[in-house]
Image: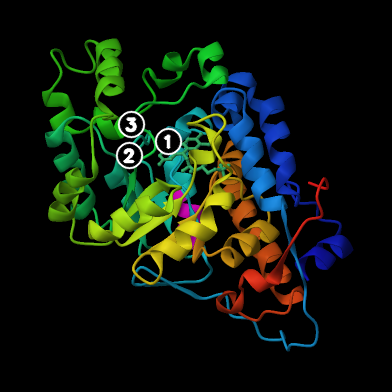
C-alpha cells in the first residue's frame, strides 16, 4: 500500500525496488575497485552463474483459494523466534563500501529483528557492532585460522559481547582465485581500513613483531597468513564444540556426507553455500546441493541457505528445496554502499515485502507449509 501512497504523494524512493539493479549503480558510483570486491567471483565467474541457474531452474506453481488473508512469517530458528526466515550473511570489510560499515548494516537488521551475522573479518571491532545491535539477535562468523590463541580470543570476545550463535565458515581455508580483486590489487583496500577485528585483537597483536601502527604492512601479511587453515579436518571441530556453548552452524556445506559429519560432530546447523561463487569456479550452484543436504540433515540439523538469493521468489524456492531460512549476501552490501543504514533497510524491506507477496500469491499463509510440491522444473532450454 505504501507503493500506491507514494505514487499519490509523488515521493520517489531513493533506491529502486528491483534489487537486481543495485550492482550496476554501485559500479557507477563507487568505481570498479569497491564494486569488484562485492560482485567478483572465483575464476571465470561460472559458480555465480550456476547459483542463479540453480534457482531459476525451479518454477513456482501458485495455488488458488487457500485463504491467505492473514499471513505469519514468524520462523523458529536455532532457539530464537524471528520475524521472517531471513538473516544477513557475513560480509567482511564493509568499510570499503561505506564509512559506517558493519555498524550501519547491524542497525538496519536489528531494527527489523533480522539477525545480522558479523564477519570475523569485519572492519569494526565485534564489541562495537554488538552495541549497535541493541537487544537483537547476535550471530558471529568465524574464519577458523591457524592460531589457536587467536581463535580462542575471538570466541571469548564474542561470548562476552553477547553473541549467541557461532557460524564457522569452512569453505575459505584459502582465499579463492578472484580475478577482479587481483586486478585491482586487493591489499591496498585492506591496509589501514580492514580486518579491525583482527587488528584490535590482543592475541593477534601478541603474534606481531612490531605494533600494528608501526608496521601495518607486516600486520596485514600476518593476517593473510593465519586467517585460514587448509590443514584442518573434521576431528578439529571438537575444539570449537568445547569452547562454544551456544549453537554452532557450519557454513559452506554442499555434500550430504559433510552434513552427516556435521551432525556427528555435534553441530547444530549448516549453511548450504558456495560462498556466493567466490571460492571454486566450476562448482555446482548452491541450490542444486540443497535437497540432498536437507535430506541428510533430517531433523538433526537446521539447514540454512545462501548464494544467489536476489528476490522474494528466490527465498520461496530455497524454502521449498529444504532450507529453513535464507541468508542474504551481496544485495544488502550494495544497499549499504549506496545509502548506508537506510540503503540496507530498503533492501530488507523490499525483499521481505516481495517474499510476503510471493508467499500469499502462491497460496501460503506461512513459510512452514512451503514444500517441493510448490515447484515445477523449468522446461529444458528455458533458463
Ligand atoms: C562474502 N562472504 C563471506 N562469508 C563469510 O563467511 N565471511 C566473510 O567475511 C565473507 N565476506 C564476504 C564478502 C563479500 C564482498 C561477499 C560478496 C561475500 C560470503 C557471504 O557470507 C555469502 O555466502 C554470499 O555473499 C552469498 O552469496 P550471494 O547471495 O552474495 O550471491
Residue 92: which numbered mark, if any?
1
For residue 137, what is the image quadrant?
Answer: bottom left
Q: Are marks 1 and 2 in contact (CB under 8 Å)?
A: yes
In which quadrant is the N terminus drawn?
bottom right
- Where is residue 221? Give x, y as percent: 29, 15
Which numbered mark, 3 or 1, is in the foreground of this view?
A: 3
Q: CA distance from mark 2 to mark 3?
A: 14 Å
Closer to the chain start, of discs 3 and 1, is 1
Residue drawn at (71%, 26%) of the image = 28
Give x and y (percent) for residue 22. 70, 39
Asked whether 107 falls inside the magenta stretch, the response is yes
- Mark 1 vs mark 2, CA separation in Å: 7 Å
Q: Residue 176: where, in percent of width, then height?
A: 45, 26
What element does badge 1 sit on? loop
**Is ligand 1 closer than 8 angstroms to the Cβ of mark 1?**
yes
Specify few, some or many for label 2: CA neighbours under 10 Å numbering under 14, 14-19, or 20 or more: many
Q: Which mark is residue 49?
A: none
Q: Reading the chain from its start, which is encountered first: label 1 or label 2?
A: 1
Q: Is residue 142 magenta?
A: no
**Residue at coordinates 58% horizontally, 63% vertically from top-left?**
321
Q: Check disc 1: other Cα within 10 Å, few if <14, some if 14-19, many if 20+.
A: many
Please state if 329 lies on the left or on the right of 66 as rendered: left
The span picked out in magenta is 106-111
Location of residue 354 with respect to 231 vertically, above or below? below
The residue beneath circle 3 is 173
Amino acid at each position: 500500500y505504501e507503493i500506491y501512497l507514494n505514487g499519490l504523494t509523488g515521493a520517489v524512493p531513493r533506491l529502486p525496488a528491483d534489487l537486481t539493479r543495485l550492482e550496476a549503480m554501485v559500479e557507477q558510483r563507487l568505481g570498479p575497485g569497491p564494486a569488484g570486491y562485492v560482485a567478483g567471483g572465483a575464476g571465470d565467474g561460472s559458480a555465480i552463474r550456476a547459483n542463479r541457474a540453480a534457482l531459476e531452474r525451479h518454477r513456482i506453481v501458485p495455488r488458488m483459494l487457500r485463504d491467505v488473508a492473514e499471513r505469519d512469517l514468524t520462523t523458529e530458528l536455532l532457539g530464537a523466534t524471528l520475524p521472517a526466515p531471513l538473516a544477513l550473511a557475513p560480509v567482511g570489510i564493509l568499510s570499503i563500501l561505506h564509512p559506517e560499515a558493519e555498524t550501519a548494516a547491524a542497525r538496519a537488521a536489528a531494527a527489523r529483528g533480522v539477525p545480522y551475522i558479523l564477519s570475523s573479518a569485519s572492519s569494526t571491532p565485534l564489541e562495537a557492532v554488538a552495541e549497535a545491535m541493541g537487544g537483537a539477535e547476535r550471530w558471529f562468523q568465524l574464519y577458523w585460522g591457524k592460531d589457536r590463541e587467536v581463535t580462542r580470543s575471538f570466541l571469548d570476545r564474542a561470548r562476552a559481547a553477547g553473541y549467541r550463535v557461532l557460524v564457522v565458515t569452512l569453505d575459505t581455508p584459502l582465499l579463492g582465485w578472484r580475478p577482479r580483486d587481483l586486478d585491482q590489487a586487493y591489499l591496498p583496500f585492506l591496509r589501514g581500513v580492514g580486518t579491525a577485528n583482527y587488528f584490535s585483537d590482543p592475541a593477534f597483536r601478541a603474534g606481531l613483531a612490531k605494533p600494528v601502527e608501526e608496521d601495518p604492512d607486516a600486520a596485514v601479511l600476518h593476517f593473510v597468513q593465519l586467517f585460514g587453515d587448509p590443514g584442518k579436518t573434521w576431528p578439529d571441530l571438537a575444539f570449537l564444540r568445547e569452547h562454544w556453548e551456544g549453537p554452532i552452524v557450519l557454513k559452506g556445506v554442499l555434500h550430504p556426507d559433510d552434513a552427516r559429519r556435521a551432525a556427528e560432530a555435534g553441530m547444530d546447523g549448516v549453511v548450504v553455500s558456495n560462498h556466493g561463487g567466490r571460492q571454486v569456479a566450476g562448482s555446482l550452484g548452491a541450490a542444486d546441493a540443497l535437497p540432498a543436504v536437507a535430506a541428510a540433515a533430517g531433523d538433526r540439523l537446521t539447514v540454512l541457505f545462501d548464494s544467489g538469493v536476489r528476490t522474494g521468489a528466490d527465498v520461496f524456492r530455497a524454502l521449498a528445496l529444504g532450507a529453513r531460512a535464507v541468508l542474504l549476501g551481496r544485495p544488502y552490501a550494495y544497499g549499504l554502499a549506496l545509502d548506508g543504514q537506510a540503503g540496507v533497510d530498503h533492501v530488507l524491506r523490499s525483499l521481505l515485502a516481495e517474499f510476503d507477496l510471493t508467499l500469499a500469491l502462491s497460496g501460503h499463509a506461512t513459510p512452514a507449509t512451503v514444500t517441493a510440491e510448490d515447484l515445477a522444473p523449468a522446461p529444458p532450454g528455458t533458463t
